[in-house]
C-alpha cells in the first residue's frame, strides 16, 4: 500500500508543481517562477503494508499500529531531536499558553516561544493612557507593560527562551500612534517626534523584558516586513504602501529602529530583520542586511516561511537562506507553516517538512549556515492563522492533540519520502 502511494507521489511530482509565493495577506507580489529542482531520489522505503491515518496523515500499518521508525520517534521530542542543532520554537496565542493541554504539548516539544499577537504594538500601546498623559507622553508613549508579566513569567518558570515579536511593523500598529494628539484623525507628527516615540517604545519594550526577566528574550524582530518592491516605489524596494513608518519617518526608519534596539539590548541578545517571501526579494534584502551589518546593528535574518505544499524548499528556503547569509548574518526560520493545497496531501506536506529540516540541519552542521532557531507559526491546525490549510504539525481530534505526518516529517522519519525539494 505504502509503495503504491509512494509511486503515485513520485508520478505526481514528476509533472512538476509550480513553486508559489509564501502566504501573506499583505503581499501583492506575483507568484515566483517555477524552479524545477529534483535531487537524488532515494530508494523506496521498505514496504511493510502501511497506509496513513486519514485524520493526521501519520504513517500506520494496516492493523492501526504506527510504523516502526515512527514508533521509535515517538519516544523523542522535537526539542530533543534538535537539541544540538538549533532551538525549536512555536508561536502561541495567550489563551493556549494558559490552557494546560496546549501548554503541556508546547512544553514537551518546544524550547522557544513567540507570542502570536500579544507583543505587537497594537497590543502594547495604551491609547487612553497616552492621551491622558499628554503633554508628557508626546514623545514618551504609554505602554501596557504589565501585560507582559504572565507571558514572560511563563517562559521564565519553564526555562523557555523567547523571540520578541515585533517592535516596528507597518501592520498591527495603530494609526493614532503617529498623530499629534494620539487620536486616529489627528495631524501626523514630524519625523523627529516620531523617531523619539520610536526610541521610547523600543527602550520600554526591551528594558522591561531585560530588567524584569533577564535572559528570557534572546532575539527581537526589530523590524518586520519593511521590504516589498511591489508595494510602492521606493528605490531600495522598501514598502511604502500602508506604512505609516515610511510615511512619517521615510526610509531611514529601518536603520533608526536597529540603532535604538542596539542601544538598549543587552549583550548577546540578537537583533533580527524579519520578512516574508524572501526568495522573491533577495537583492533588496541583501542590500539592507549588508548596510545594517556593516554598522554592527543586526545579528540575524528571520525568514518567515509561510509556505505551501507546492513550494520548492530548495528555492523558497535553502538557497535563499544561503544567499542572505552571505551578508554575515545568522538565519532563523521564524514563522514556519506549510499549507496543504487543494490537490495536495498531508503526506506531501510531511515530505516538505522533512526536506526543510533535513537541509537546515545539514547546513547548520556543515557550517554553511548559522541557524539560531526554527519556529512553527502555531501549535495545531485548528488554531492556525491559515484556517482550513492544515499547515501545522499537530491536529485536534476527539482523542486530543495528535501528531500529524508533518511532525514525523520534521523529525525526519525514514519512512517518509523526501524525493524532491
Ligand atoms: C498573524 C497572526 O498569526 C494572526 O493571528 C493575526 O491576525 C495577524 O498576524 N507575519 C507576521 C506575523 O510577522 O506576526 C503574522 O501573524 C503572520 C504574518
Image (spheres, rainbow, N blue to C red):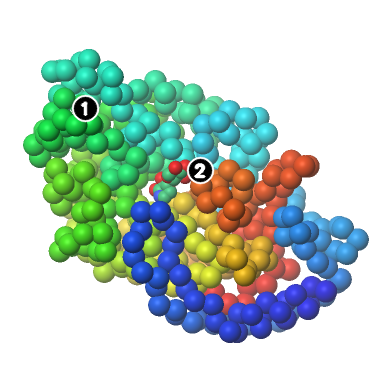
Q: Is residue 41 above or below residue 211?
A: below
Single out the residue that lies furthest toward the top: 132
Q: Earlier in the sequence, mark 2 or mark 1?
A: 2
Q: Nearer the viewer, mark 2 or mark 1?
A: 1
Mark 2 nearby-residue class (10 Å; few <14, some 14–19, many ≥20): many
Single out the residue that lies furthest toward the right: 63
Image coords of residue 289 (percent x, y)? 26, 59
| Residue at left offset 26%, top offset 59% | 231
Q: Is residue 301 above or below residue 12?
A: above
Q: Tags 2 and 1 in contact by the CB under 8 Å rule?
A: no
Mark drawn on residue 115: none
C-alpha span from label 2 to label 1: 31 Å
Kindly tell me whether mark 1's CB lies below 8 Å from ligand 1. Answer: no
Q: Is residue 96 left or right of residue 217?
A: right
Per the image, the residue denoted by label 2 is 91
- Secondary structure under tag 1 reads loop
Quarter occupied by residue 67:
bottom right
Q: Is residue 416 left or right of residue 246?
A: right
Screen quadrant of the N terminus: bottom right
Q: Is residue 211 left or right of residue 413?
A: left
| Residue at left offset 31%, top offset 66% | 281
Numbered disc total? 2
Per the image, the residue denoted by label 1 is 183
- Secondary structure under tag 2 reads strand
Screen quadrant of the C terminus: bottom right
| Residue at left offset 51%, top offset 47% | 385
Image coords of residue 139 (percent x, y)? 15, 26
Image coords of residue 266 (percent x, y)? 31, 36
Q: Is residue 57 left or right of residue 41?
A: right
Kindly tell me whether mark 2's CB lies below 8 Å from ligand 1. Answer: yes
Mark 1 nearby-residue class (10 Å; few <14, some 14–19, many ≥20): some
Image coords of residue 382 (percent x, y)? 62, 45
Amino acid at each position: 500500500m505504502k509503495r503504491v502511494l509512494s509511486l503515485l507521489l513520485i508520478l505526481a511530482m514528476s509533472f512538476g508543481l509550480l513553486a508559489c509565493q509564501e502566504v501573506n495577506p499583505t503581499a501583492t507580489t506575483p507568484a515566483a517562477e517555477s524552479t524545477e529542482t529534483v535531487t537524488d531520489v532515494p530508494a523506496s522505503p521498505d514496504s511493510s503494508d502501511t497506509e496513513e491515518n486519514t485524520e493526521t496523515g501519520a504513517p500506520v500499518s494496516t492493523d492501526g499500529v504506527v510504523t516502526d521508525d515512527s514508533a521509535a520517534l515517538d519516544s523523542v521530542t522535537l526539542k530533543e531531536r534538535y537539541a544540538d542543532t538549533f532551538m525549536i520554537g512555536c508561536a502561541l496565542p495567550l489563551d493556549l499558553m494558559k490552557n494546560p493541554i496546549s501548554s503541556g504539548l508546547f512544553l514537551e516539544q518546544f524550547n522557544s516561544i513567540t507570542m502570536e499577537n500579544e507583543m505587537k504594538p497594537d497590543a502594547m500601546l495604551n491609547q487612553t493612557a497616552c492621551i491622558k498623559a499628554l503633554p508628557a507622553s508626546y514623545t514618551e508613549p504609554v505602554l501596557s507593560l504589565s501585560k507582559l508579566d504572565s507571558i514572560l513569567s511563563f517562559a521564565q518558570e519553564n526555562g523557555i527562551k523567547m523571540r520578541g515579536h515585533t517592535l516596528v511593523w507597518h501592520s498591527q500598529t495603530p494609526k493614532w500612534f503617529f498623530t499629534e494628539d494620539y487620536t486616529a484623525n489627528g495631524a501626523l507628527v514630524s519625523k523627529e517626534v516620531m523617531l523619539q516615540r520610536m526610541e521610547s517604545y523600543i527602550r520600554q519594550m526591551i528594558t522591561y523584558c531585560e530588567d524584569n526577566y533577564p535572559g528570557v528574550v534572546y532575539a527581537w524582530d526589530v523590524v518586520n516586513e519593511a521590504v516589498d518592491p511591489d508595494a510602492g516605489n521606493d528605490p531600495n524596494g522598501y514598502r511604502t504602501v500602508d506604512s505609516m513608518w515610511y510615511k512619517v519617518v521615510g526610509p531611514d526608519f529601518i536603520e533608526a529602529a536597529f540603532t535604538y534596539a542596539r542601544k538598549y539590548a543587552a549583550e548577546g541578545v540578537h537583533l533580527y530583520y524579519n520578512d516574508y517571501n524572501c526568495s522573491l526579494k533577495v537583492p533588496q534584502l541583501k542590500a539592507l542586511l549588508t548596510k545594517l551589518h556593516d554598522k554592527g546593528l543586526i545579528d540575524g535574518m528571520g525568514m518567515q516561511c509561510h509556505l505551501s505544499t507546492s513550494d520548492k524548499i530548495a528555492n523558497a528556503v535553502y538557497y535563499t537562506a544561503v544567499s542572505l547569509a552571505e551578508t554575515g548574518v545568522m538565519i532563523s526560520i521564524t514563522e514556519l507553516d506549510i499549507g496543504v493545497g487543494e490537490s495536495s496531501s498531508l503526506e506531501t506536506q510531511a515530505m516538505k517538512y522533512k526536506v526543510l529540516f533535513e537541509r537546515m540541519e545539514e547546513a547548520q552542521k556543515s557550517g554553511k549556515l548559522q541557524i539560531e532557531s526554527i519556529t512553527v507559526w502555531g501549535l495545531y491546525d485548528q488554531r492556525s492563522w491559515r484556517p482550513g490549510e492544515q499547515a501545522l504539525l499537530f491536529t485536534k481530534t476527539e482523542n486530543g492533540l495528535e501528531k500529524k505526518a508533518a511532525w514525523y516529517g520534521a523529525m525526519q522519519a525514514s519512512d517518509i519520502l523526501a524525493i524532491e525539494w
